[in-house]
Image: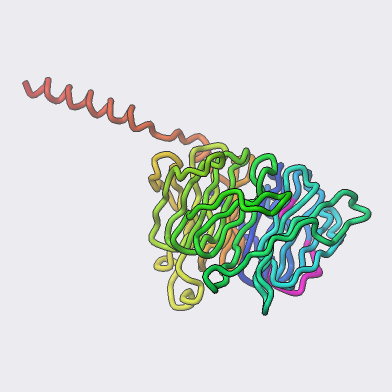
Amino acid sequence: MKPYLLQGHERPITSIQFNYDGDLLFTASKDHVPSVWRADDGDRLGTFNGHKGTIWDLDCDRMSRYLLTASADATVRLWKVETGECVATFPHIGPVRGVAWATGSRQFATISDPFMEHNGKIRIYEIENIDDIDTEPKLEIELPKIMGKRVNPTGVHWTALNEAVLVSFDNGVIKLYDPQTGDVQEEFRAHEKKINRCRFNRDKTLLITSSADFTSKLFDAVDWQHLKTYPTDRPVNDAVISDHKEHILLGGGQEAMSVTTTSGKVGKFETRFFHLVYQEEFGTVKGHFGPINALDINPTGRSYASGAEDGYVRLHLFDKDYLEMKDPVPEEEDDEEDDNDVGDVGQTR
């Protein structure tokens, strides 16, 4: 597996994303400057300058024309991908933790942390005319305290056909909100600890979660039933579903505060490959010197990227062995073993 080391950020990586066509890779970090790279060879194509705080999340639209970035400087910015020009700035009250385009790229949702006496909020914006953008949200949903304790949102996504806005929280709960009224449509507990990230597969029929409780879980994105669990021995910071193979990629590692006293081998900073159906781990890819904070698989299925606390992005091109690898079918293996057993018995007699 051939890796490219992308050295463009000065601080830990927070989010990475391939565009829809798989020819661009967008990265964000705590150094305030999102970047865009060529996905084939890792060449840096440009940066988006203007934020004054950590970039916690980003999202590129379907046609790769506009990029949204969410920052700790309490703003969301809209950029032209081709030129790097900031088209609009959307002010918030607290640090913005997540941002997501809706299908069709005519509206987007954001989540912000509580700040002083203000609770966290979900905001939904509409973009009807790119030349005359309204920076005020069309809907605000306040996130009240639960039993006197603030619960912070950790991620925001749109479900299929924009039917709901899915928000994950640091208490392990996932809620679905009506994007028109703000009402809670559904609520369920996915994990016992903080949900670090959620991701859909390409057609939004499956949802995978990553948690500080050392597990990643797969859910049916239609009825939200829990399907599979992928257990690990470390916090899981991100997980992605391959659209070309029945594989799950997990990334994480020990807490960042302990990294300076731990070697890469002991800290378990590798990407782990699991079979989606059988929940079996069948491979790892090493290389980072800190916890992996972000992962994404190229929509073409030919590569994946990982970003870590060490400030590096590693772009891995899958080799021929992996691309041509066929997943084992347990039933066939069992049949072969039974046939061998019968043969052995016959020889003994």
Q: Is residue 123 above or below residue 12?
A: above
State which region is magenta: 47-60
Q: Position of residue 71 (x, y in %)?
A: 71, 68
Q: Find out whether residue 51 is within the magenta segment.
A: yes
Q: Position of residue 275 (x, y in %)?
A: 43, 42
Residue at 56 percent across and 37 percent down: it is: 244
Q: Position of residue 123 (x, y in %)?
A: 73, 59
Q: Nearer the viewer, residue 153 or 281?
A: 153
The quarter holding residue 124 reads bottom right
Residue at the extreme left of the image, as rendered: 349
The quarter holding residue 118 reads bottom right
Q: Find out whether residue 301 is within the magenta segment.
A: no
Q: Is residue 201 above or below residue 55?
A: above
Q: Is residue 289 above or below residue 333?
A: below
Identify the image's colour scheme: rainbow, by chain, secondary structure or one colour: rainbow
Q: Position of residue 45 (x, y in %)?
A: 77, 57
Residue at 64 percent across and 56 percent down: it is: 156
| Residue 303 horizontal side relative to residue 44, left or right | left
Residue at 50 percent across and 52 percent down: it is: 188
**Is there any visible trace of residue 58 in the rendered image?**
no
Residue at 46 percent across and 42 percent down: it is: 276
Residue at the extreme right of the image, as rendered: 131
